[in-house]
Amino acid sequence: MNRGNLFKSLFVLSAAVLAVALTYAAQAASTYYIDPSQVDLVHVLAPPPAPDTDESQADLAAVRAAQASRTDDEVKSAKADAQETVFRFADVMGPEFKPENLPFATTFFNNVRVDDEQAIALAKLHFNRSRPFVVDPEIKPVVAQPANASYPSGHSTFAYVNAILLADMVPENAAAIFKRAAVFAHNRVIAGVHFPTDIEAGRIAGATIDNVLLHEPRFMVDFAKARAEVRHVLGLPDN
């Protein structure tokens, strides 16, 4: 490589590194309750299965099997759950669990979503796992193909972050809430955009993120307000 091409390559590489750094700096600045550095998922999560191992082949086989057997109803559910909103839990929370009835809780859960997205961003970058449809072109997703890495699953993280908080708000409905989170997470395998081990990592990530949130005083103040609003709207005693 001549000197001109070397300098050009170094410039392009430096620009790319700077772009990534600026992106993550901007993301960190947009968080609400916690900083991503408080949630060290890189050291909490086991690495995903290495390519060409029996475990990775089993992971891929599970996605293939889900694609081969998915029903129209499962496809419809997977498409609907592609939307990351706490109100996907309305089917187990009740018909009154909707944004127009819960102005404070809506803002609260949106802030939590921003924080959990930023908390997993560095882990995705670190593990950099290819999506199932990249590994096997025969995998045909039924939702938009995400451009970021596969591990851990962001949707699964979102599902369990919200499930833990909702179950704390409404312990009377905890079993149904966690069952709904499991469906939400598994729908990403049905959709063809995640491996089962991505989903399990998302479950662990969600619990890890909530453990940090639940020790933040400012978060707990807003959590108490959101909890009271949710219980009032659902007609439950504020205990």
Image: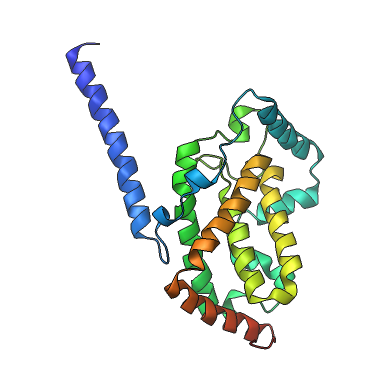
Q: Residue at the location (68% across, 30% down)? A: 55
**Residue 101 in sight in this render:** no
Q: Residue at the location (71% across, 55% down)? A: 182
In the displayed structure, would residue 104 be above or below residue 237?
A: above
Give the left or right position of residue 74, taking residue 27 as reference.
Answer: right
**Residue 52 in sight in this render:** yes
Q: Residue at the location (60% across, 26% down)? A: 51
**Where the N terminus falls, by quadrant?**
top left
Which one is in front, 13 or 147?
A: 13
Give the left or right position of residue 206, taking residue 58 as reference.
Answer: left
Number of labels in the image equals 0
Q: Residue at the location (78% across, 35% down)? A: 65
Name the residue furthest left. Answer: 3
Measured as percent of width and height from the top left, residue 125 is found at 45, 40
Measured as percent of width and height from the top left, residue 3 is found at 18, 14
**Colouring mode (rainbow / by chain / secondary structure / one colour):** rainbow
In the displayed structure, would residue 50 be above or below residue 201?
A: above
Measured as percent of width and height from the top left, residue 98 is found at 62, 75
Measured as percent of width and height from the top left, residue 81 is found at 65, 56
In the displayed structure, would residue 194 be above or below residue 79?
A: above
**Where the C terminus falls, by quadrant?**
bottom right
